[in-house]
Image: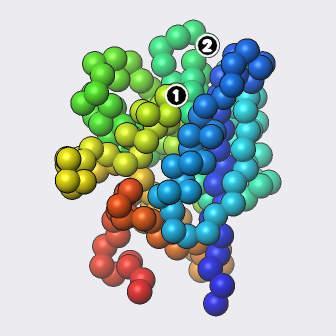
Amino acid sequence: MAKQFIKIGLVSISDRASSGVYEDKGIPGLQEWLKQALISPFTLETRLIADEQDEIEATLKDLVDFQGCHLILTTGGTGPAIRDVTPEATLAIADKEMPGFGEQMRQISLNFVPTAILSRQVAVIRKQCLIINLPGQPKAIAQTLEGLKDDAGKTLVHGIFAAVPYCLDLLGTQEKPMPYIETNETIVKAFRPKSATKG
């Protein structure tokens, strides 16, 4: 049986990058990380949009409802500034909130910068799709996805992506099963209970 492709939406939210003032680094950074971290086949839907709540909501709805994404990763728009409305837009289209992702991202980032406490990233489920708000900087994106490792590469604090494959497993139904995601364990080791592990 052929492996089912996971469909991932990448959304970079930035007024200046979307208007061409500077080059977007969020989507290229995420693409590069996913190429290294995922063994399973995947396809991408990418969007570069402004910090406008209506536009963010419409984009997320489109990626879930019409493009059929299993996972959406957003970057940008999660700080305390007036124009930062990514969390509000994400919560507005959600069926369920998954607070553990935001808590863990802030916990990881606080090991690097005290201003991580200002971040407001959230994660939610809409239908059978997991949507996660990531930080805006490529370095911080990788840190929160992978977690903290010592000099020998041993994981000290788990990154959030370790929980993503099993979360998607749980969103599957008999009529619509989810793709089984496998990761490159040198980047991030997916955690599943033994009963949910294949092969």
Q: Are marks 1 and 2 in contact (CB under 8 Å)?
A: no
Say whether residue 194 is left or right of residue 11.
left
Residue placed most toward the observer, 65 or 75:
75
Q: Earlier in the sequence, mark 1 or mark 2?
A: 2
- Identify the secondary structure beneath mark 2: loop
Q: What kind of residue is marked 2?
A: Arg
The residue singled out by tag 2 in the image is 83
Say whether residue 160 is left or right of residue 32.
left
Give coordinates of residue 48: x percent, y percent: 73, 33
Residue placed most toward the observer, 67 or 40:
40
The residue singled out by tag 1 in the image is 136
Please tell me whether mark 1 or mark 2 is closer to you in this view: 1
From this view, report whether residue 43 is shown above or below residue 59. below
From this view, report whether residue 151 is shown above or below residue 177. above
Give coordinates of residue 64: x percent, y percent: 70, 52
Q: Quadrant of the N terminus?
A: bottom right
Give coordinates of residue 66: x percent, y percent: 79, 54
